[in-house]
Amino acid sequence: MGAFFLILLNFGIVIPPATVENAPAMQYIEKYSELAIQEMHRTGIPASIKMAQAMLESNMGRSTLAMKANNHFGMKCGSAWNGQKFYREDDDYQNGKLIKSCFRKYSQGEKSFVAHSDFLSSSTRYSGLFDLNPKDYSAWAYGLKAAGYASDKSYPQKLIQLIEKYELYKLDEGYKSKKQDYAYDEEALKEKGTNKKKASSPTKADGNYVVSSLNKSKVVLSNGKVSMRQIAKDQEMKLKDLKELNQHIGVSTSAPIPAGETIFLEQKKSKYSGKERFHIVEEGESMFSISNKYGIHTDMLYIKNRMPKNAQPMVGEKVHLKGLVRLKDIPKYIESDSGKAKKKRSLF
């Protein structure tokens, strides 16, 4: 019996043996599962979630970043990183051209796992995740997307698929959260002698969706099963008010909202409370979609970047999230009435 199975048996966990088809995945789980469990106890991040993220983002340890930089989570350098660096093309642009991005390079893959834990647990953007039930991997998967961890709308479903295919949820067994109670825990409700309907509260799983927080605004992340009408009813809101806050939702109020869509339950904020200073514009993004991603009021985002309201930033430009941008740093943009790229002074 391999070391992997000995480790897991200590936790009373049995994972299906490897086959030719799933051998790379099982070998990867064998190598890093104990570390994922240790990190769960250290920081509260479910081991199932950590393993699924690592498996997805590193392609079971076979990605270029994993093999050449021991970076299993695609973590970029950032201004605070002063360790070794690895450069490769990803999604960073300069003057409209794709340039090589700076990624962190670790001496061991294990250090990448620890760094990923520290990143999630120390960031205000992801603080709401740690109020979720640590054994509710579905809530965590959708919560990560709601907090802006990935741009891929199907990111939560991909994590859940890996967790269920390889029974990674078994890695979470035995973990006791510091949180004492969850309003959505049916067993806890029964023990309290009440059959009340599960109440909505920030950062919790609500069956069909997750209620979370984005830049201190209450939001819902759809998993493709809930409608605007149902959310309005659950949250005791007027449907017209919910529609007004979410004009970007392109389906009828009774139709299921596409999975991964963020629905705001209150106005977006005028200031950004996260650590990011700017956003690099990707293909297909607009000022409105960027404002939704960070929970900043669209009008304020235009003001911060000294851009006219009929303009959209060009791919690869930096849209600033904090403070008023300097005149020399105004993003290049295209005005909808001209179709020509511009970068000029603004009246703001």
Image (cartoon, rainbow, N blue to C red):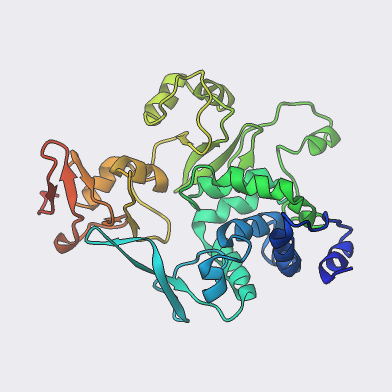
Q: Residue at x 29, y 44 (%)?
A: 287
Give above or below for 281 relative to 194. Answer: below
Q: Residue at x 33, y 48 (%)?
A: 283
Instruction: Estimate the x, y position of residue 48 in percent, counting from the top left.
Output: 70, 55
Asked if residue 70 can be seen in this view, the reply is no
Horizontally, is 93 left or right of 328 in the view?
Answer: right
Residue 36 falls in which quadrant of the image?
bottom right
Residue furthest front as drawn: 20
Instruction: Estimate the x, y position of residue 181 in percent, counting from the top left.
Output: 74, 45
Give above or below for 252 relative to 317. Answer: above
- Point out the image quarter for the N terminus: bottom right
Asked if residue 311 can be seen in this view, the reply is yes
Residue 57 falls in which quadrant of the image?
bottom right
Instruction: Estimate the x, y position of residue 195 in percent, counting from the top left.
Output: 79, 26
Q: Residue at x 16, y 37 (%)?
A: 336
Horizontally, is 52 left or right of 92 in the view?
Answer: right
Q: Residue at x 84, y 71 (%)?
A: 3
Instruction: Estimate the x, y position of residue 273 in percent, counting from the top left.
Output: 41, 55
Residue 266 falls in which quadrant of the image?
top left
How many numbered circles are shown? 0
